[in-house]
Amino acid sequence: MYRKGDYVIYGCKGVCQIREVTTLNMEGIPKDRLYYEMQLVSDPGSTIFTPVEHEGSRSVMRPLLSEDEARDLLRKIPELEEEWIRDDRAREAHYRDAVNHGDAEAMLSLIRQLQLRRRARIEQGKKLPVMDSRYLKTAQDNLFQEFSIVLDASREKVESYVAERIRQSAEQKKKNPV
């Protein structure tokens, strides 16, 4: 059970801070059922309620990565290669699963893949498709905010670090294709 003040990842919503663990005074809701009252870090005016015991819920809630876990994950950027999924629906399902489950490694892999794909398309005079752009933005917003908090760094610093690691790994792969 999380406590007041804890930060969590809440599905595709991203980083939330728990403001209270409380009951809800609403008709049809058991008076003894506990809820987390959370606030999105990206939207201080927001309020999200979710049951403390949320079995069967589609939303995944997990603690933020530790500083060591975040640093380890950032070191893995060159290894996070995936096969491009050509089918738009299958690719979107893959993206949705990564984002909705708050899977940090899968989101970082998605970010790496889509940043490289966007760079290649720009060189061809094309844009990244809207669906890919939307999931890239969501993954970046959620993951970079998490990294920013756990590494005590600005989002801009996190974003530039990740972009540089992706660029370096792509250049290294061109030099040593095998």
Image (cartoon, rainbow, N blue to C red):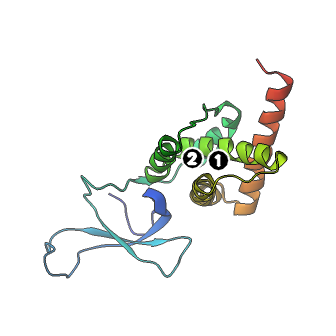
> Is 98 above or below relative to 58?
above
Which residue: 65% across, 59% down? 148
Callout 1: helix, strand or loop? Answer: helix
> Is 86 above or below relative to 89?
above
Give me the disc on residue 8: none
Q: CA distance from mark 1 to mark 2?
A: 6 Å
19 vs 72, left or right, is left
Q: Are marks 1 and 2 in contact (CB under 8 Å)?
A: yes
What count of labels does the image hold?
A: 2
Q: Position of residue 9 (x, y in %)?
A: 47, 57
Q: Position of residue 50 (x, y in %)?
A: 31, 66
Which residue is identified by label 2? 107
- What's under tag 2, amino acid-wise? Met
Alpha-carbon neighbours of circle 1 within 10 Å: few (<14), some, or many (≥20)?
A: many
Alpha-carbon neighbours of circle 2 within 10 Å: few (<14), some, or many (≥20)?
A: many
Which residue is identified by label 1? 111
Callout 2: helix, strand or loop? Answer: helix
Q: Nearer the viewer, residue 11 or 92?
A: 92
Q: Quadrant of the N terminus?
A: bottom left
Q: Nearer the viewer, residue 143 or 153?
A: 143
Which residue: 49% across, 42% down? 94
